[in-house]
Image (spheres, grey):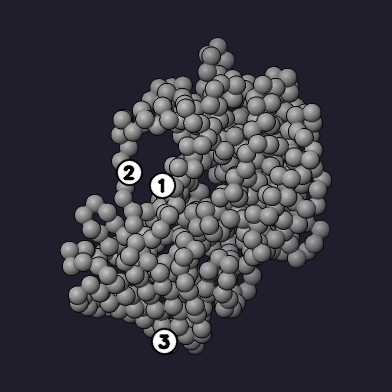
Amino acid sequence: MFNELLAQQFPRILTQACRDVHSPFYGCFDRNWWHYRIRDFSSIMLQQGGYFAFQYSKLLGFEVHKEQLRELAKASAIFWNHRAGKKGAFEEYYPWEQGYPPLAFSSLAMAKLVAQDVVFVDEIETGLRKAAKQLQERFEYQAGNQQVAGLAALGVIRKIFPELVDEDKYIQIKQKTLALQNAEGWYTEYDGPDLGYLSVTLDCLFDLYDFTGDHDYLESAEKGMDFLHDMITRFQGSTGMHNARNTDYIVPYGIFRFLEHEDEVYSKKATEIVAIIYENLDSKTHFFRAVDDRYWIHYIGHSIARAQLLMNRLKTPKFGRNKYQPTDRIYEKSGYIFRTLPESETRILVSGKKGGIFTLFNKEKQLVSNFGWIARDGNKVFVNHWWANDWKFAADDKKIHIEGFLYPHKEKISKPVLHMGLRIVSLLFGSRLTGMLRNVLIFKSKSSTIAFERKIDLAGEEVIVTDIIDNIEKKVQLRRAPRASRRHVASADSWHQEDFILLEIEEPSEMIIRKDKKAVITTTYKI
């Protein structure tokens, strides 16, 4: 299924690596550092490229490169060890960062290379010791996929180098990590669910299950699979901007593991997801076509390679979509609202905790998305397209109601003086800086005083949307929001066709009434 895609990416991924065995940079996967020299540190996150190279060495059609790929993978681990031993190690975005994602993901990849006899444990012992110590001292509450990856790294290190991991501490971290999973099945990602990062979490849960044999991890993966399947089959695709972290892609390995699940219910769910998400891989608009090289090296590339290796050893399953059944549901925890238009197969997905953004769709395609409004006052903007737990929502069969307050946002411009200050502060405070940066770039401590109310009426062949924006000055400009979110969340913001085309139906009618400090906008969509 993925062979052609992997073959296309093979030269791009290897281009990122220093392949000169005589170079001191041999095994480094950060081309911006070792070749272009436009960065003054090497991002340790990118050393996962070595694990990707190792997976390629096992793929059919790459036998001729097997030894060179294994040697490159080994070199990536040795280079990782060199970087991990430095002060302020585990850098991703800036020097001396001590970031949790690079700690978790890169350590997991390197530990698996040891477990699979690509590199000897004593060749990267320094890095493993440092990683194990930090993984037992730190915990990531706000991004579930990162914490599960960290636990997986700890689980693999515990298997190959048991004296580095305290057993009681490991059990405590395990319990805290599994507690991050919501009753609906999703792991919290900056206050809400994200299908893309949930699929990454599934990959890591299966790593934990494989290296520990602990069925708690399999049960957690099953709960995640239930939510993933329910959302994808209802929406007939990836939910994209309805995710808390705006992620378009779904990585396949954890999903493909369910193809060999002993319970046929889960193997059937896997076949249905695969048919919906990956059947159009040849399409120029498929989300894998828009993923940048950084994330191919990160976890996307090796997830695809591992899924293909799994396919190679399984009997070819029959992938088939489930019958399109427009059933309605409200997810109380995540705020998702699915409703069907009366006497129609057209459906609507509304994100109640993301300011009421919505998408109209049917069994064939998405028809239109509405991402709300941008209120601009000078160089500051106020938006409703912002995931937060403060939004209130309610729905019945024919009406959906969302209310709250717009969130303020001001773009932070990257400048040399800011980067210089960042380096000084990170050198002094290390990982303690991360929380402060997240509060500036990702979270908002409070909303504005500009009230926003959205009423959606599902009236036969029409959808009538009434937006009320209150407490705005006359000088404030109102503009319809594009697909892009103002929230800074990697790895989001890949190109999507909705960047250019939000409508697959007739242009809606619009009426705007502004009086005093209130604006009432009525938008009517004819289906």
**Mark 1: amino acid:** Leu
CA distance for labels 1 and 3? 39 Å
Q: Earlier in the sequence, mark 2 or mark 1?
A: 2
Instruction: Name the residue beneath numbered marker 2.
Output: 412
Q: Is residue 520 above or below residue 201?
A: below
**Mark 3: amino acid:** Ala
Q: Is residue 500 visible?
A: no
Question: Is mark 2 in CB contact (under 8 Å) with mark 1?
Answer: yes
Question: Is mark 1 in CB contact (under 8 Å) with mark 3?
Answer: no
Question: Is mark 2 in CB contact (under 8 Å) with mark 3?
Answer: no
Residue neighbourhood size for the residue with mark 1, other residues' Cα within 10 Å, grouped as few (<14), some (14–19), many (≥20):
some
Instruction: Name the residue beneath numbered marker 3.
Output: 459
Q: Residue at x 62, y 55 (%)?
A: 187
Number of the front mark, 1 or 3: 1
CA distance for labels 2 and 1? 8 Å
Q: Is residue 515 above or below residue 6?
A: below
| 210 vs 418, nearest the viewer | 418
Q: Is residue 447 visible?
A: yes
